[in-house]
Image (spheres, rainbow, N blue to C red):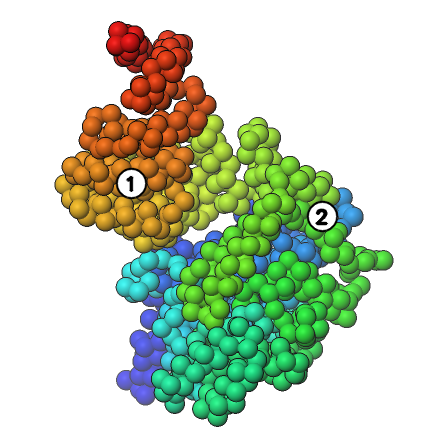
Amino acid sequence: MGLLKKITLAILLLIVLPVLLLGLAELACHAVGIGYPTSLFIKDSMPDGTPCLRINYQAARRFFPGNLARRPLPEIMPAVKPAKRLRIFVLGESAARGEKLADFSFARMLEAALNKGSSEQVAEVINTGIPAINSWVLREFCREIVNYQPDALVIYAGHNEFIGPYGPASVFGLAKNRNAALTGIWASSLRIIQALKSDRMPTELTKGWQGLEMFLKNSIPADSPFVKECLANWQANMSDICKLAQERGIPVVWCQVPVNHKDCPPFMSDTRGLNQADLDKIKTFGEKVSEGDTSTAAQLAKELENTAKNNALYNYLAALLNNGTGDRKLARELFKKAVDLDCFRVRTTDAFNIAAQKIAQSYGAETVLLANLFAEKSAEQTTGKNLIYDHVHLTFRGHYLVARSVYWAMVETPLKNKLPPGFSFPDEKEMLELLGYSNADAIANLEHIISSMSRPPFTLQYNHARQLADLAKELAELQQRSDQVSATAVSRVALDRQPYNHRSAARLAMRLNDQPQAATNLFEQSLKLNPFNIDTLNNLASLQIQQNQLAEAETLLKRALDLAPGFAQAYFNLGLIAAARKDTTLAAAHYKTAAAADPAMFLALRNLGNLHFRNREFAQAKSTYEMAAAAAPEDMPSQLGIGNCLMEMQEPTMAVEMYKRAAEAFADSPLPRYSLGKALESSGKPAEAARPYEEAAKLGHLPSLQQLINLQLSEKITLNSEHFAKLCLLGCEMTDFKDPWFNQTLAISHAQRGELDEALGILHRAAALAQEQGKNELLREIEANIELITTSR
């Protein structure tokens, strides 16, 4: 065989044949439904047959292990862009998405502004923001987006370069180098690779999505070589995105991303080179700054300036000190330095912003210097919580400033000729009306903020307790000013102004939970505009479950699962339907699937525990309740469920300890105290049970009061007559003197003190109430007491 033939054969065997086999395997996987689509959008049709592009809820799945990928927003657009329609894409992460303010993000504001005054939609702003993604993912999204006739790309990203996929502090999988990352990304799009990939997650991730807490072990100091490596990858990915847009003639608006300098202390500081005395001194420094003792704080700062100069917390405290004493220029520099030195890298630094700006400008992109703008709009020229509520996520006003700035940047691009003539960007008040933002939305967002900031890494921050107290005070003030009627009215105005907005229709429906038919009509209106919104499908199904329309709800939930196979909330609601039909086996299966899809879904775990408990499977119930309590420590029923299982398993001592812990954790609830009282009573300790019963009674819990009074009546405890009389009177007051049993106990308390006339009068009233309420057995008991007192007189 000639040399050429040998080389040709070798090429066939080593390259062509494997590629051919891989192609055939990939086709086979597609044919039998193995794997999942990885594109950002999927071709589909509206109910009237019009071709559309709907979001692929699994678009980020290939970049994350197991079920950790977060869902994109329910975006939709015509497959063929209508004439004169503006189509703008936002590339970003959770900060661009808006988190709890997703319906009020700068993307939604920009869209509402461009459609202002139009009876039909003339602009669509597609927000691709997904939590925890980074430029590696955005690069892939961009390769697809450029094919959808975009009029502009808006880039608002940079916070997740370290912790996102392929980042050096990621828990989602690392790459040795850029080529390895690109190869991995390509391979993850293949169905055959998806089939081979295990969904098992590392032990530390089995709790499911835990937000920033997942990355706490992956600190990176400022001098780590990973910083330069990450910056280089960021630059390369940004360059790829801008170059691709330039080649397609698509205008790009790049945003310098701001961070919270003033009101977000460092999460993690580099303590190398510091001894315990230095660390103690930094702690004292913080205390003195907090107390306003500037003299002592200044002395401590001077003592630490050499040894602690690379410590993020020291620089932050020095910034606060200088800000308070008037040297605000130095304070701003120190605030920035604190972010640069923060070893928990979840905020874009100046270096990353500057690098991206240079790349964007080199490709002719418009740049929006938002960090500078935010500082200008902030007190003392330092960005704080008025514009960024945590470390990077924007407030409503923050989103508004971004939206307005992006619009004016677009005016400087070729897109200018496509913008509405004579257009004026809405002021902030009008934007509130266009989007239907109310105090109820502000409350929901603030509750989300408090929940997030009650967990690590925020709990590690300087002055965390004060921050939470301030947020709680702000929430209480908001709640006092809020009412359902005004929130509903605001949502209705937004829908009236832009009736083509499916989000506004769905949001108004949620406001009308007490009007099932009106809410149903609005959900259906929303689904006509976007039939692929799984949250709307699920919310309508929840409403139908409440109305016992189980078959209709089941159809909607199965539709949602067709669109998003791992949609835990849909499985949970299917579990409710099965439970309502008394099919406990199927209900348990659905709850298990929901919990597997989202281990943080404590409601599914709690309901599954309840099923086990009713089936007297107490060991399984206890284990399930424990998982629910671990997923949601604030869920009281799960903790009480553990105690109830221990009681059934003949472990009263352990149950009592569980109830005691629950009573401490939920100081405002009577239920743990009631359960504790029952456990102590059943353990033969009625005297000890009396205290938790009385505590629960004072919190308004009638069953606890009844148990306590019964202990006295059955002579298991001994209360003095005055104490007993007060308890009986409390029961009557709590029932508006309409409960015959409590009236009878009050009469007994009078009789015990020799006040027989008063006792008889109350007993006659109790008898009348018992007769009126049909409580015949109790009536006979009361009549016997009347006869007893009458005879004894």
In-front residue for pair 509/75: 509
| Mark 2 element type | helix
- Please give left or right for residue 540 compared with residue 725 in the image: right
In-front residue for pair 673/570: 673
Above or below, 393 relative to 314: above
Residue 515 percent coordinates (x, y): 57, 29
Q: Which residue is mark 1?
A: 691
Quadrant in the picture for residue 692: top left
Q: Which mark is residue 433?
A: 2
- Please give left or right for residue 121 compared with residue 354 in the image: right
At label 1, the amino acid type is Arg
Quadrant in the picture for residue 413: bottom right
In-front residue for pair 264/593: 264
| Mark 1 element type | helix
Instruction: Kindly identify the residue that appears in the image at 65 percent across and 55 percent down.
Output: 108
Quadrant in the picture for residue 586: top left
Residue 258 percent coordinates (x, y): 61, 72
C-beta proximity under 8 Å, tags 1 and 2: no
